[in-house]
Image (spheres, helix red, strand yellow):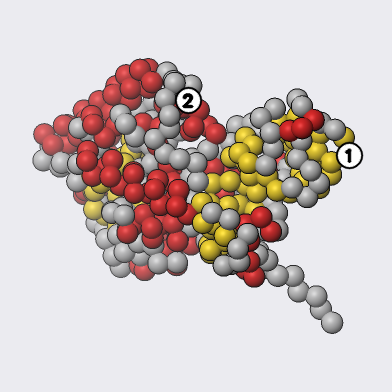
Amino acid sequence: MTYRALPALDVNRHLIGVAGGRAALATPALVVELDVLKRNVALMARLCSEAGIALRPHAKSHKCASIAKLQREAGAVGFCCAKLGEAEALTAAGVSDILLTSPIVAEQALVRLAALNAHADGLMVVVDAPEMVTKLGAAARASGKTLGVVVDLDIGLHRTGIPPEKAADLAVAVAGEDGLSFEGLQAYAGHLMHLGDAAERATKSKAALEMMAGVRDELTRRNLPPKILTGGGTGTVHIDPGLGVLTELQGGSYVFMDREYNDVWTKAGDAPPFETALFVQTTVISAALPQLCTTDAGLKSFATDAGPPVLAKGAGPSASYFFFGDEQGGVLCGETKDRPALGDVLSCVVPHCDPTVNLYDAIHVVEGDTLVDIWPIEARGRGF
């Protein structure tokens, strides 16, 4: 007889609605506190509304159709996806009006783009190379539908984007290509999002968006005014909307927050505007030493580019978390009384939310100590 393991979505399903079910989760588990998530979603929607700009949140942070639908209900005009695979998965789950924020270049990707455009509503892509205009046009014609195109500007990150002085000519080429519709400009200053000095972040963000404004003005002089000017992020949420350049904000991590983004504000002496909603829950599996214990969440359970997680619940104030191997984490305590006991459950603030989410198949949704739902992460692993 063949043994069949439970799918990840079903391992903890029997705990839905059970009082205290959160503490009984099989771990490591990705957990989101629903009330906090909803407050973050509502706050970002309000901030954008008060600033008179639209919100197009970046779905690369959560990769989850259930969260996208909460954002849409709160007023989001659409979504961003970093990769074609993310857009394919979320479109299949009912998410529409997606902007692909990374250039599509490979031949196989262009074929898939054509297929996606044929079925998706409101799909847009970015371009930063003149030689890709005709290829995108061919993909659009193959799909049988017009494809919206946004010119991606390099305003200092140097990751993607065309230099601003060359952008107007590229926009004209897009507008002249059969099957394409020039929609606007994208500019993302990712290199500024985590600057700890608030004044420096504000000054440099303003200078970066002034480059975008210059391209906007040049296109307007050429009778090709951009419909949308999209960019910005969580780290500049109190800066970019008020500068009068962007028409929509692309923030993503605000739904969850993580140690990196919390540090953006706390290092400047301020409280973060958004609350921490996302945690990895882990269990103590060994506690033989007085000031040290081992958990079941190691390098495979967290993105490791930003250091170890921060203990939020389950250990005393002298405790700190460290990676103890691929499968295990460690908790080192300055005082014996702060050490968790064998079987104790800990909650950790993740160092970097986006790549941590990508390690899991499901998000366990809790209200207080009760598991209320399990959401699939439809675009998990869709980095192609």
Classify 10 Å Cα crowding around label 1: few (below 14), some (14-19), many (20 and above): few
Q: On the picture, is 256 further left or further right than 301?
A: left
Q: Of 161 and 79, which appears nearest the observer?
A: 79
Taking the image as shown, residue 30 lies to the left or right of residue 220, namely right
Picture quarter containing residue 180?
A: bottom left
Measured from the top left, where is residue 220 in percent x and y?
13, 37
Q: Work out whether residue 173 or residue 307 is closer to the camera in this orientation and state it.
A: 307
Label 1 sits on what residue type? Ala
* Tag 2 residue: 266
Residue with the mark numbered 1: 288
* Disc on the earlier residue, 2 or 1: 2
> Residue at the spot x=29%, y=21% of the render?
207
Looking at the image, residue 60 lies above or below residue 13:
above
* Secondary structure beneath label 2: helix
In this rendered view, identify the residue nearer to me: 114 or 184. 184
Q: Is residue 347 depicted above or below 189 in this figure?
A: below
Q: Nearer the viewer, residue 218 or 82?
A: 82
Give the label, 2 or 1, closer to the camera. Answer: 1
Q: Count residues near mark 2 (Cα–Cα under 10 Å), then give few for <14, some for 14-19, many for 20+.
A: few
Separation of residues labelled 2 and 1 (CA atoms): 35 Å
Residue drawn at (35%, 28%) of the image: 155
Is residue 112 visible to the viewer in this orientation of the structure? no
* Residue 68 percent location from the top left of the image: 41, 57
Mark 2 touching mark 1, by CB under 8 A? no
What residue occupies the far front of the structure in this picture? 337
Image spot of residue 384 (x, y percent): 54, 53
Q: Is residue 377 shown left or right of residue 274?
A: right
Which quarter of the image is occupied by the N terminus? bottom right
Which residue does the image show at 73% across and 33% down from the upper left?
Answer: 338
- Quadrant position of residue 148: bottom left
